[in-house]
């Protein structure tokens, strides 16, 4: 004969937390009350009453000066408001999983959504959660959900926020979710069944399928115990729900080869042990080497020591702490301060219920039955190991610049402060390094002193390697005529240097524009983006000659399409010579006005009449298409009949 015990039988972390908080309050506060049963277990309530804690059924029974303990199921919003109004001190022992449902309902109220809770209509947890919104709807299960939607088809398009009672049967919730997903167009669905409850239900179902008799221990008012019994009955023909060992009888085990034992979340370990012992006495033919209940429990107990690494499952995420199931008698807690190195991070952004998490034990309290954990400290150890490996392997890391320091900047890399000297910041000498604050940068670790907690890095090293790689790629693929989009890096009187992706090329002033210009600054500025093409290159000397003029738009062609001999053009004087003046007819095409054609009288020099930049009308007197030369005359438009000279030939 064999007795099998479910691993997750007994107190869950939420119940244990509530009972521990109530006990502590009873010891510290001379006048304390519990508002309703702290958990659904008469034995625990009796124990607390023996410690001096009074049980009341309503807030108006609280006396002045008493400290009120809110039960694990939570309370209605109005109760908190009433207690606050009367100045009562409160110890909120509400299960963090229940608190999460309350927060979801309250948020739905703020967003104008309708909270939908799948659970028992009159259960205190459900009623308490529903009170955080005036629009809350409570439905027992999928059948009622279908009816509710059919009663008013427009409800299918309502903005809904759906949650489940923490102890809801998983099958009921899954069926309800399917209906919501298929029929509702604007439903936000949150899985709020307690992870411990789900695990307990799953284990109970698996165990019930293997045994001849299944015993479920727990208070008859306990919803999760009742659900356990219902689940077991689907798998086993003989299921009994009891509160104490005295309710067992030998007839129950007649013909039984294997018996199973599980318990609700509000059942103390002492009662489970008592039931197990009684079952062992009732079953006469058990194996001689059958393990005792204490041994079965000890198998799941682990000894926790400060400084050790432990792995557990996240069972609740609250605003101030995260609960972790470590698979032992102590409950694990991570305060928000010990969760992440980032002080602004929210707990829900770091972990989720059900996540496996590795932590560092910073304190064990065996008396109170809990362990304080730190993810931040373990992460810090791992980060330092990663930093050292990165230095050895010359790995590029990313971080955010957090401050300007004396002689450089500080970069946060996974929570570690990395100092980057100004000379390694990648910025020009004398640059304002404060402008880098907030930027995400890539850097190389150059020095690590773990004892002094000193890390030095270089942004410049990463930039240099990136530039080297880019240069190699440019020289490998460069060819005459190839186009690039570059950035003007610097300017001289004879042209500009353009970065085409790690390599600088020179654009001569004559290649910047079809128009005649005296200085590159007339058409470009440092930092401008420029479309250029390769005219020539020398890989050995690492020189590249670039052009920026649009070869597809030849100014001479434009001139020939626009003007003919005899036409008058408004031209701009661009250069004065001793023999005449050059004038721009269209951008990129100049014509010569011979000194004899500038005025209707003899002049000593062109500057006596004209000035550079001046706009004048001139007549086109000749066009040499082969040499692309143009002769212009101002005199021809002045109406003079003097014959001072023959028409001058076009000169350069």
Image (cartoon, rainbow, N blue to C red):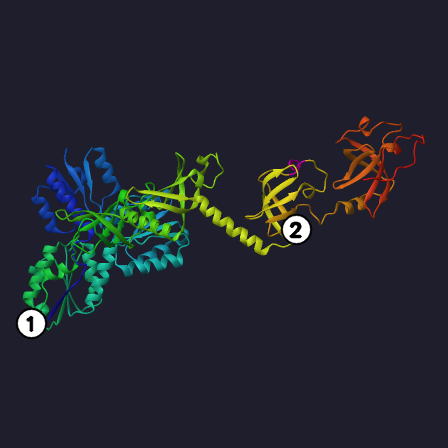
Q: Which residue is mark 2?
A: 536
Q: In the drawing, does residue 219 fall left or right of residue 475? A: left
For residue 328, what is the image quadrant? bottom left
- Residue for point 83% across, 47% down: 625
The answer to which of marks 1 and 2 sits earlier in the sequence is 1
Is residue 525 inside the magenta stretch? no
Return the x and y of residue 464 as percentages of the image width and height: 48, 47
Tell which residue pokes out farthest to the bottom in this image: 255
Label 1 secondary element: loop
For residue 285, the mark is 1
Decide whether the magenta segment is chiefly helix, strand or loop: helix
Return the x and y of residue 626 as percentages of the image width and height: 83, 48
Return the x and y of residue 505 as percentages of the image width and height: 61, 46
Label 2 secondary element: strand
- Residue for point 13% across, 49% down: 366
Neighbours of disc 2 within 10 Å: few (<14), some (14-19), many (20+): some
184 or 603, nearer to the observer? 603
Quadrant in which the C terminus appears: top right
532 or 318, nearer to the observer? 532
Q: Residues in magenta?
A: 519-523
Return the x and y of residue 17 as percentages of the image width and height: 18, 48
Quadrant in which the N terminus appears: bottom left
Residue 37 in sight here? no
Cα distance between the residues tagged 1 and 2? 99 Å
454 or 216, nearer to the observer? 454
Residue 27 in sight here? yes
Neighbours of disc 1 within 10 Å: few (<14), some (14-19), many (20+): few
For residue 71, the mark is none
Is residue 522 inside the magenta stretch? yes
Q: Nearer the viewer, mark 1 or mark 2?
A: 2
Position of 181 relative to 284 (above/below) = above
């Amino acid at each position: 004969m064999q007795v099998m015990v479910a691993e997750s039988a007994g107190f869950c972390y939420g119940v244990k937390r509530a009972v521990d908080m109530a006990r502590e309050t009873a010891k510290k506060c001379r006048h304390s009350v519990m508002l309703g049963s702290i958990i659904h277990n008469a034995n625990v309530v009796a124990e607390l009453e023996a410690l001096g804690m009074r049980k009341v059924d309503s807030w108006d029974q609280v006396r002045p000066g008493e400290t009120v303990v809110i039960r694990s199921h939570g309370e209605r919003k109005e109760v908190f408001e009433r207690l606050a109004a009367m100045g009562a001190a409160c110890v909120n022992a509400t299960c963090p999983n229940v608190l999460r449902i309350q927060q979801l309902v309250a948020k739905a109220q703020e967003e104008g959504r309708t909270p939908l809770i799948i659970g028992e209509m009159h259960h205190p947890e459900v009623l308490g959660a529903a009170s955080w919104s005036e629009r809350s709807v409570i439905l027992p299960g999928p059948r009622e959900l279908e009816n509710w939607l059919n009663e008013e088809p427009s409800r299918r398009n309502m903005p809904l926020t759906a949650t489940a009672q923490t102890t809801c049967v998983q099958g009921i919730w899954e069926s309800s979710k399917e209906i919501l997903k298929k029929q509702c167009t604007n439903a936000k669905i949150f899985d709020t069944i307690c992870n411990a409850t789900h695990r307990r239900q799953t284990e109970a179902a698996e165990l019930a399928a293997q045994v001849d008799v299944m015993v479920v221990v727990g208070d008859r008012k306990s919803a999760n115990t009742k659900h356990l019994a219902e689940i077991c009955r689907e798998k086993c023909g003989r299921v009994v729900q009891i509160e104490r060992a005295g309710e067992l009888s030998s007839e129950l085990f007649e013909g039984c080869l294997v018996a199973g034992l599980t318990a609700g979340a509000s059942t103390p370990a002492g009662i489970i042990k008592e039931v197990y012992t009684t079952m062992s006495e009732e079953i006469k033919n058990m194996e001689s080497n059958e393990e005792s209940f204490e041994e079965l429990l000890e198998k799941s107990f682990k000894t926790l020591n400060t400084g050790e690494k432990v792995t557990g499952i996240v069972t609740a995420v609250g605003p101030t702490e995260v609960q972790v199931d470590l698979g032992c008698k102590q409950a694990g807690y991570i305060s928000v301060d010990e969760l992440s190195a980032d002080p602004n991070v929210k707990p829900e952004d770091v972990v989720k219920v059900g996540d496996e998490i590795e932590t560092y034990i910073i304190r064990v309290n065996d008396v109170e039955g809990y362990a304080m954990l730190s993810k931040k400290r373990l992460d810090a150890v791992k980060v330092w190991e990663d930093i050292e490996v990165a230095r050895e392997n010359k790995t590029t890391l990313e971080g955010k610049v957090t401050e300007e320091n004396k002689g450089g900047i500080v970069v946060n890399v996974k929570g570690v402060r990395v100092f980057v000297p100004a000379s390694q910041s990648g910025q020009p000498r004398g640059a304002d390094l404060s402008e880098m604050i907030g930027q995400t940068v890539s850097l190389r670790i150059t020095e690590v002193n773990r004892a002094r907690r000193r890390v030095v890095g270089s942004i410049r090293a990463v930039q240099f390697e990136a530039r080297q790689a880019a240069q190699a790629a440019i020289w490998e693929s460069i060819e005459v005529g190839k186009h690039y989009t570059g950035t003007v890096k610097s300017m001289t009187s004879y042209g500009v240097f353009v970065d085409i992706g790690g390599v600088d090329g020179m654009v001569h002033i004559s290649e910047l524009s079809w128009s005649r210009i005296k200085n590159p600054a007339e058409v470009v500025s440092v930092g401008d983006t420029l479309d250029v093409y390769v005219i020539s290159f020398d890989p050995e000397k690492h020189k590249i000659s670039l052009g920026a003029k649009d070869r597809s738009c030849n100014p001479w062609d434009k001139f020939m399409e626009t003007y003919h001999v005899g036409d008058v053009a408004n031209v701009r004087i661009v250069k004065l010579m001793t023999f005449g003046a050059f004038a721009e007819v269209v951008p990129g095409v100049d014509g010569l006005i011979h000194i004899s054609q500038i005025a209707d009288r003899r002049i000593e020099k062109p500057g006596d009449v004209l000035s550079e930049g001046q706009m004048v009308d001139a007549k086109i007197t000749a066009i040499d298409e082969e040499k692309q030369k143009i002769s212009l005359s101002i005199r021809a438009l002045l109406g003079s009949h003097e014959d001072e000279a023959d028409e001058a030939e076009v000169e350069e």
